[in-house]
Image: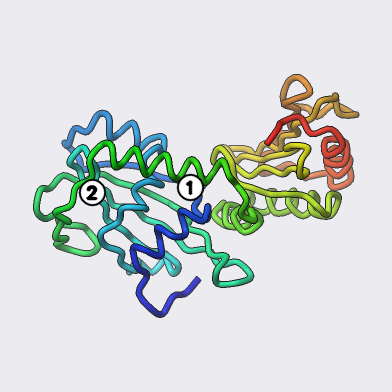
């Protein structure tokens, strides 16, 4: 999504609170070499702090790197004293209001008054450092919004798929198209950092995730699928692993989708 006017910190926060922020499938985390932020690193590694950071940005800049045409970079203060740089893209849906923040990376930096960023030079830090209580309050507000989960998740799933590389994106796109074709009233969403598909008031019946060498198509239902997929265990987690050299069998996967949608195995 190309934005001609500057993006504000309030706009980013509003997108988060509208449940329109996800973590990219290949989200990266790092910190300045030699700087020890043991607890912070844990948050960076698992992404626990990345969304609350978006709600407290003090500066947002459009990414100037040529390979990030939809990219933005924001800076936030962490209650442990570090400064966070958050890299994210804006993925546009059918309407501008459907934009999704896709967080691609977050890194920790040390500095009390200023830091020197490799792309934007000297950054004067905000004097407002949140307390631990304030940070945890952001996390609770975001988690409450995620539990409410009343936003249309189709654009979020599209954004997730678009962030996948090459052949993995092709597999995910084909799986997504099969599900929408076979279950017209499907409800998509990004949960637990991966796309899920459900039937309203019944539950989730399918999901997918991308790994280094394969894409896993999972079916979450209360009965065994016929025939049984080659990967996964028990009715709740039957799966098919596809490598780059594999071909997705449209007819067979469509049959599994129909079977799983009839008996969703994971509640809302």
The disc at residue 236 is none
Residue 201's spot in the image, x, y percent?
A: 76, 41
Secondary structure under badge 1?
Answer: strand
Residue at the extreme bottom = 4
Mark 2, other Cα within 10 Å: few <14 / some 14–19 / many ≥20: many
Depicted 245 relative to depicted 64: above or below: above
- Pick whichever, 45 or 98, lies toward us: 98
Residue 78, quarter of the rendered image: top left
Query: Image quarter for residue 64?
Result: bottom left
Q: Quadrant of residue 230?
A: top right
Q: Is residue 264 above or below residue 12?
A: above
Dot 1 or dot 2, earlier in sequence: 1
Q: Position of residue 197 (x, y in %)?
A: 72, 44
Give x and y (percent) for residue 9. Answer: 34, 63
Compared across the picture, whether 255 is left or right of 121 comes to right
Residue at image position (29%, 46%) is 107
Q: How many numbered circles does the render carry?
A: 2
Applied colour scheme? rainbow
* Mark 1: few/some/many CA within 10 Å (<14, 14-19, 20+): many
Judge left or right: residue 135 versus residue 100.
left
**Disc 1 vs disc 2: which is toward the camera?**
2
Numbered disc 2: secondary structure: strand
Q: Which residue is mark 1?
A: 23
Residue under numbered circle 2: 77
Q: Residue at x 79, y 49 (%)?
A: 179
Locate the C terminus and report the quarter of the image it occupies.
top right
Q: Is residue 89 left or right of residue 150?
A: left
Judge whether 113 appears above or below 72 on screen: above
Question: Residue 4: x percent and y percent?
Answer: 41, 80
């Amino acid at each position: 999504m190309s934005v001609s006017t500057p993006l504000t910190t309030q706009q980013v926060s509003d997108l988060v609170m509208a449940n329109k922020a996800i973590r990219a499938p290949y989200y990266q985390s790092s910190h300045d070499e030699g700087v020890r932020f043991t607890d912070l690193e844990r948050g960076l590694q698992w992404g626990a702090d990345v969304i609350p950071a978006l709600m407290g940005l003090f500066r947002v800049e459009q990414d100037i790197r040529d390979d990030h045409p939809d990219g933005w970079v924001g800076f936030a203060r962490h209650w442990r004293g570090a400064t966070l740089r958050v890299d994210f893209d804006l993925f546009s849906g059918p309407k501008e209001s459907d934009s999704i923040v896709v967080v691609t990376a977050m890194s920790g930096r040390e500095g009390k008054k200023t830091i020197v960023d490799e792309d934007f030079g000297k950054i004067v830090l905000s004097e407002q450092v949140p307390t631990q209580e304030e940070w945890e309050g952001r996390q609770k507000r975001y988690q409450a919004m995620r539990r409410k989960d009343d936003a249309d998740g189709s654009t979020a799933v599209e954004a997730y798929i678009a962030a996948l590389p090459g052949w993995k994106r092709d597999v995910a796109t084909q799986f997504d198209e099969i599900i929408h074709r076979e279950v017209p009233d499907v409800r998509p969403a990004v949960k637990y950092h991966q796309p899920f598909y459900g039937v309203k008031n019944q539950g989730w019946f399918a999901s997918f995730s991308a790994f280094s060498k394969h894409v896993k198509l999972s079916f979450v239902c209360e009965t065994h699928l016929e025939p049984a997929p080659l990967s996964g265990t028990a009715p709740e987690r039957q799966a098919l692993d596809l490598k780059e050299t594999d071909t997705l069998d449209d007819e067979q996967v469509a049959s599994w989708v129909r079977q799983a949608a009839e008996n969703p195995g994971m509640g809302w």
